[in-house]
Amino acid sequence: MSKKDYLILSARNGRHCAVRFLNSATGKYMPAISLGTSNKKEALKIVIDWLKNGIPDKGQIQDMEARDYVFNLIKGDTFTCTQAEDVIKLLKLRGFLSEDVQLKNASTPLLKDYISDFWNFEKSLYVKEKKLQGEKIGYAHCKNMLQLARKHAFPVLGDKHLSELNVEKINAFLLSCQDKGLASRTVNNISVSVVKPLKFAYEKKIIKENFNIALYKFSLPGKERGILTREEAYRLFAAKWPDKKSYLASLLASQTGARIGEIQALRKEDIGLDRLFIRHSWSDIEGLKSTKTGDSRIVPLMPEMRKALLDLVESEANPWRLSENPFIFWSCHPEKPIHRHTLNDAFKEALEQIGIDEAERKERNIVFHSWRHYVATYLANNAKKRTGMGITGHKDERTFDGYSDHEVDTDFAEKMEALKGLINYTPPIEKEKIKFS
């Protein structure tokens, strides 16, 4: 059944009658035009006269027809995002839009869905590509990134489609994180958790916004790790420790600068004749993995320390001493080493014994990792850079050079003699060739 060319609307609430003409292009009725009378018969005569002799202001009707056509086209299901982009371009060209408009494209995924897939270690296309390219990426890193995004980004940006986001919105979000009092390192990590997936989406042509430029970097200085003095270290190792494993782990860290995960990962076969082979690190999530830099290294090992480590791993107290290549710092599980919390707690307890209580420890920011700074600072001030970096495993010269700014002990001569003994030690047995590179 064909539609009538017009509809007459009766006068209501004191208003005049009105007419709605049919838009032949859209097949829908246009907005109502007042007929200047409340009498419906008179209104009908006016409409018939308009159709016979012409509408007094036909330009108005033509404008309405054109507008109605555009509006209905946009509201229709067949109107696409590409067509919307064309409309925006024309509006910008005509000067009706003074700033960029980002289209909401439901064809792009929600941020929370895309990031959840991106940091899924088992399923992520990004992770698969990294592995194929021989680049290092760990399960723990992916898990930490996803946790950061869920905690901070999802509540603010999670329900937005990728196409709705731009650099300005991400920067505003990062500034809001800083305003909450989060540390600069935390804010930068949050940025990585969100921006890296967005950069990948741009590379894969999922979105058009380039997130490789103009993003904020937060570089406010964090709290520097504290370093024990030589005298404090001497008293610390003279204190009574909760257990022998924790004592030897800290002592070894103070002589090698090894990270706590590297010490946990040490096994019997890593003990050489006069050196320690640092090949792995331990993660509670990933288990035995490569070191932080991905490279192995060799550090000199004092004869007294070598004997102590062998005695520990071969002692009757170790239930796994007869197993193949057991952990030096063993636990009650043969496939796991001592937990880092055990080493940290024992370290703090020993600090208490020498008068460094919890308040002072926090104020000075002294933690187990301080041993690494202790060794690196000493080497940076007293050894050739190549030698020092070979011991600590630092890959970045700028990072290693930074340790030379730390304040060092006044007992400089004692430290130098200890360092000479560490670097130039020659055992009375067959030597293995040491290379620091």
Image (tube, rainbow, N blue to C red):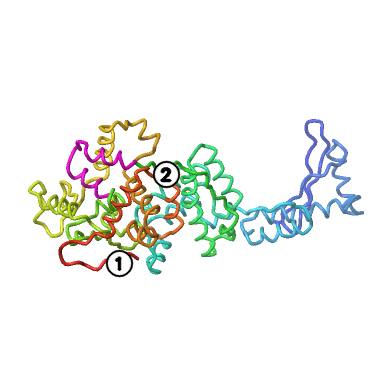
Q: Position of residue 330 (x, y in %)?
A: 17, 49
| Sequence-first disc among 2 and 1 | 2
Q: Quadrant of residue 26?
A: bottom right
**Viewed as shown, does residue 63 lie left or right of 383?**
right
From the image, give the main secondary structure of the stretch colored magenta.
helix
Check the picture and name the quadrant holding the C terminus. Answer: bottom left
Q: In the rendered picture of this protein, how many numbered marks are placed on residues?
A: 2
For badge 2, the amino acid type reads: Glu
Residue lying at 41% horizontally and 65% vertically, measured from the top left: 130
Would you name the residue on which mark 2 appears?
407
The disc placed on residue 404 is none
Quadrant for the N terminus, please: bottom right
**Residue at the spot of label 1:** 435
| Residue shown at 74% from the left, 50% from the top | 29
Report helix, strand or loop for mark 2: loop
Task: Characterize the local packing of mark 1: few (<14), some (14-19) or many (20 or more) Cα atoms within 10 angstroms.
Answer: few
Residue 271 in the figure: left or right of residue 2: left
Pointer 2 local density, CA inside 10 Å: few below 14, some 14–19, many at least 20: few
Measure how far apart labels 2 and 1 are at the Cα level. 29 Å
Asked if residue 42 is positioned above or below residue 426 in the image, the reply reads above
**Residue 243: horizontal and vertical position, in percent?**
17, 40
Q: Nearer the viewer, residue 309 or 51?
A: 309
The x, y position of residue 256, in whole percent, is: 29, 53
Q: What is the magenta range?
A: 229-253
Q: Is residue 91 magenta?
A: no
Circle 1 SS class: loop
Residue 352's image quarter? top left
Amino acid at dot 1? Lys
Residue lying farthest to the front in this orientation: 413
